[in-house]
Image (spheres, rainbow, N blue to C red):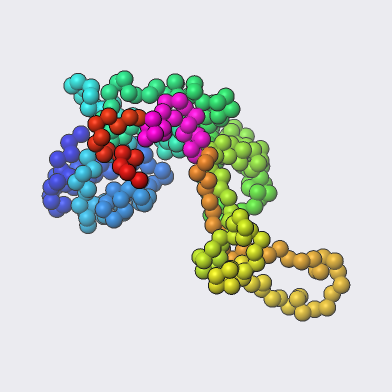
């Protein structure tokens, strides 16, 4: 694909034609719904935008000059060590974001932006073979759900449908019971679709990605975390602010009552919560494969023969 338009003025027909070709390519390959990652200097491939907004951004600000291999928009980085291999647009692999998420969760290693030879490319089958049996099973089950259509001709796979549904639950604050009732209705209405029987069953599938986090109460003024020795503290030891949200008074609180239900103490709600994604499980997953574990230990095991500083470990502490 011709990319000479990237360096042209933004008001030229060549730039506009090339920009539309880029958008067509990106939306055909990696769009989620009606959005892709915007590569403009402001968004930096971090924000998802619609086609019109991406177009406007790349007219207001020029297309990044150094972004010539569109790895974030469906194009695979070309391995330079192969001789005279012509890669056409039709030969570019289309990678689904859900499959990338599965590969990341199970310690997949990528070689974008690195020149490697054929002997250095790690075979996917070999990497999967190195995994523990339980993780191997989870990996293949997730890939199966990713490639299995929700129903014949469906836009979404079974796994993508669960992700979309779980996203809606998180945004709207629906309870697990409410989600189960919705799934029951959907399954009863669309008997031909592969819909889980309960939200508990759906969550078991999502949990295989190991995206769990730990909730840690925090001071509203960000002074401290209620963690380890301070886990039972009621107030911040620095600013003395209460750990809990103030209770809202209602008219019922002022009415005399003797019922056990109304005498029951209300559960306190923390004023601020930190969600911590533990690093240890991520490192354990990276070391599941012997090939990746070798790369993880490189800084400790590899010898620096000529004394040249190429890595922080080569310098004096």
Which quadrant of the figure contains the N terminus? Answer: top left
How many marks overall? 0
> Quick one: 293 or 114, which is closer to the camera?
293
Name which quarter of the figure residue 118 lies in. Answer: top left
Q: Which residue is drawn at 14% across and 46% down?
A: 7
Q: Residue at x 73, y 78 (%)?
A: 251
Report the predominant secondary structure element of the magenta stretch: helix
302 is within the stretch colored magenta: no
Q: Residue at x 75, y 76 (%)?
A: 253
Q: In this view, does 314 lie to the left or right of 276?
A: left
Name which quarter of the figure residue 94 lies in. Answer: top left
Q: In this view, does 313 lie to the left or right of 169?
A: left
> Quick one: 71 or 215, which is closer to the camera?
215
* Image location of residue 267, percent across then percent down: 71, 63
Q: In this view, does 213 lie to the left or right of 23?
A: right
293 is within the stretch colored magenta: yes
* Image location of residue 225, percent across then percent down: 56, 60
Part of the protein shown in magenta? 282-301
Q: In this view, does 38 lie to the left or right of 296?
A: left
> Quick one: 159 or 215, which is closer to the camera?
215
Q: Which residue lies furthest to the right in this view?
A: 258
Q: In this view, does 94 lie above or below 241?
A: above
* Image location of residue 198, percent across then percent down: 66, 41
């Amino acid at each position: 694909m011709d990319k000479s338009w990237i360096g042209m003025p933004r008001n030229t027909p060549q730039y506009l034609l090339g920009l539309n070709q880029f958008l067509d390519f990106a939306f055909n390959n990696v769009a989620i719904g009606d959005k892709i990652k915007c590569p403009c200097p402001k968004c930096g491939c971090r924000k998802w935008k619609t086609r019109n907004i991406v177009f406007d951004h790349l007219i207001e600000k020029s297309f990044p000059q150094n972004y010539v291999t569109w790895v974030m928009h469906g194009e695979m980085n070309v391995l330079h060590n192969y001789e005279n291999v012509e890669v056409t647009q039709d030969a570019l692999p289309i990678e689904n974001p859900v499959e990338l998420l599965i590969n990341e969760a199970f310690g997949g290693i990528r070689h974008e932006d690195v020149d490697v030879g054929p002997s250095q490319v790690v075979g996917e089958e070999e990497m999967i073979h190195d995994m523990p049996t339980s993780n191997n099973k989870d990996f293949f089950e997730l890939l199966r759900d990713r490639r299995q259509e929700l129903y014949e001709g469906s836009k979404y796979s079974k796994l993508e449908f669960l992700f979309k549904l779980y996203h809606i639950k998180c945004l709207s604050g629906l309870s697990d019971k409410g989600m189960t009732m919705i799934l029951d209705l959907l399954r009863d209405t669309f008997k031909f679709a592969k819909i889980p029987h309960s939200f508990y069953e759906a969550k078991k599938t999502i949990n295989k990605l190991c995206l769990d986090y730990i909730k840690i109460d925090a001071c509203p003024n960000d002074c401290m975390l209620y963690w380890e020795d301070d886990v039972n503290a009621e107030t911040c030891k620095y600013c003395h602010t209460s750990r809990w949200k103030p209770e809202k008074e209602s008219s019922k609180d002022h009415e005399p009552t003797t019922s056990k239900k109304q005498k029951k103490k209300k559960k306190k709600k923390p004023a601020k919560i930190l969600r911590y994604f533990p690093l240890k499980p991520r490192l354990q997953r990276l070391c599941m494969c012997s090939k990746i574990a070798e790369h993880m230990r490189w800084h400790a095991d590899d010898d620096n023969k000529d004394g040249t500083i190429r890595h922080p470990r080569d310098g004096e502490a």
